[in-house]
Image (cartoon, rainbow, N blue to C red):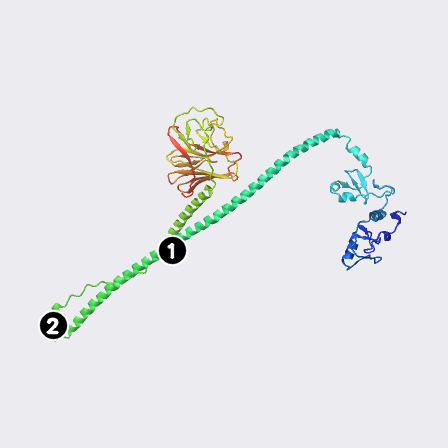
Amino acid sequence: MASPTSWSEENFSCPICLDVFSSPVSTPCGHNFCRTCITKFWDEQAQCKCPVCNELFHNRPDLKVNILVSEMAAQFKTSVRVKEQPCVEPGEVPCDVCTGTQLKAVKSCLVCLISYCQTHLEPHQRVAVLKKHQLVEPLDHLEERMLTDHKSHPVVPLKEEYEVKMAGLGNIESEVPQMIQERKQKIKEIKDTVKLSKKDADTAIADGLQALTALMRSIEKWQEDFNKTIQEKLKSTEKQAEDLIKELEQEIKDLTNRSSEVKQLSHTEDHLHFLQAFRSLKDPPPTRDWTTVEVRPPSYVGTWRRSLDQLEETLNMEMKKLHGDDDLKRVQQYEVVVTLDPDTACSGLTLSEDGKQVHYGGLVNQLPDNPKRFTYFAGVLSRQSFSSGRFYFEVQVKDTSVWYLGVARESIDRKAYNALTPKNGCWKISFNKDVFVVHDDPVVSVPLRAELQKVGVFVDYEKGLLSFYDVEARVHIYSATGCTFSEPLYPLLNPIDFDGRKSSLLIISPVNQTD
């Protein structure tokens, strides 16, 4: 039997598309077609017939690939491609895969260390793993290149290298779940941030509407007061004019009567009657010198200017009140439970059983030694710590003249006599003689307008923000920004006076947003 390479293309051509078979199938009558060609042909016909001999099939045949024809067609295609490629010439790099007649190599693989002709290079262009191999222009003597490249390299047994790499793979395998978990946590943080941002946006919109309503009420009241003032000025002017007109009309009436009497008397010829009537003629009524009398229309310019100044002051006060109140309401929603940890309390401090109050009475308590306890600084930390997000708590400071209040990081030195500053891991305020001292960098003094009853403390961990509020007055006192929070934070309280002699008390209070 002749080999496919000695046959012509007609022996392997589909009668329908006239091209070399692609997935050839055979009909019951023995003719071969491309599967796609015969399937499409029958789809367009009312009956299933053989396109070559017109044999009619009552039922559509179940076509199967003709393996023999398929293999011969494939060999024919390969032989045709090989014939189209140039054979290797002297000085050129031959294909290392070709048997018999060697073809010219078009690429060399530095991974396989083999040169390939165009036909045998095909897997490197199709298979995913082989696509990663480094292909270069054809190189001769790749075996020698391999030996040269590795002459100075250290050599280890295959099994030993396998075990080393397998151990490394185990490390990677253990690290991957942790990395996945970290990324899931980051996704959660991002979603939580978006959720909080949406909540803040809704709150801001509601607060903005409330503020606008309050401002509109202030403007309406100002307009009402302004109109009332103008009307009162106009009414006063009208009353003045009315009184003057009445006075003038009365003088006119009196003068008219006198004129009539004089006129009647001037016409009498009875001398006795004239003299008698003349003596009884009334004296002229008192009259005003009207040359200097005038009604001046009121000027509204000054009223307008004073009213505007008053409106501006009212609006400023309203804005300040609304801003402080709204801001406090916003942070109060992040209230957390805070109880004091007796293991951290310095001697001299006494805690209530529920951990909500800390009292200093000037007496040194004999407390068991504890690595968490403050030695020199008369402070106490909370049991709870916070290492992300936002949190808020309130402390009653009424009747306590001097105190500290803030947050401290977990690693703060509790045994040394160090200043409790942000550099040393403490962010706080102190109160003494009606002045807030914020231990920021630099230290800031904030005067207060009213007696403090309760202080609110708010922390935004990610933003590095620490804010203090006068809860009773519902105003913002101070905010420290740019704080570096990298460890768990603990609320910090200290009710002791500077001289250590005054009895004082601090109380952690529940948040009441209706205040």
Q: Residue 180 location in percent, x, y?
A: 62, 38
Residue pointed to by mark 2 = 274
Q: What residue type is labelled 2?
A: Phe
Above or below, 292 against 70 in this view is below
* Residue 234, quarter of picture: bottom left
Which badge, 2 or 1, is on the more N-terminal residue? 1
Q: Which of 246 and 474 is in front in this view?
A: 474
Of tags 2 and 1, which is closer to the observer? 1
Of residue 322 and residue 239, the one placed in the foreground of this image is 322
Residue 223 circle label: 1
Residue 495 visible here: no
**Residue 242 against residue 80 in the figure, above or below:** below
Q: Which residue is drawn at 59% across and 37% down?
A: 182
Q: Relative to 53, does residue 444 appear above or below in the rendering?
A: above
| In the displayed structure image, the side of residue 244 where residue 74 appears, left or right | right
- Dot 2 surroundings within 10 Å: few (below 14), some, or many (20 or more)? some
Which one is nearer the viewer's eye here, 364 or 49?
49
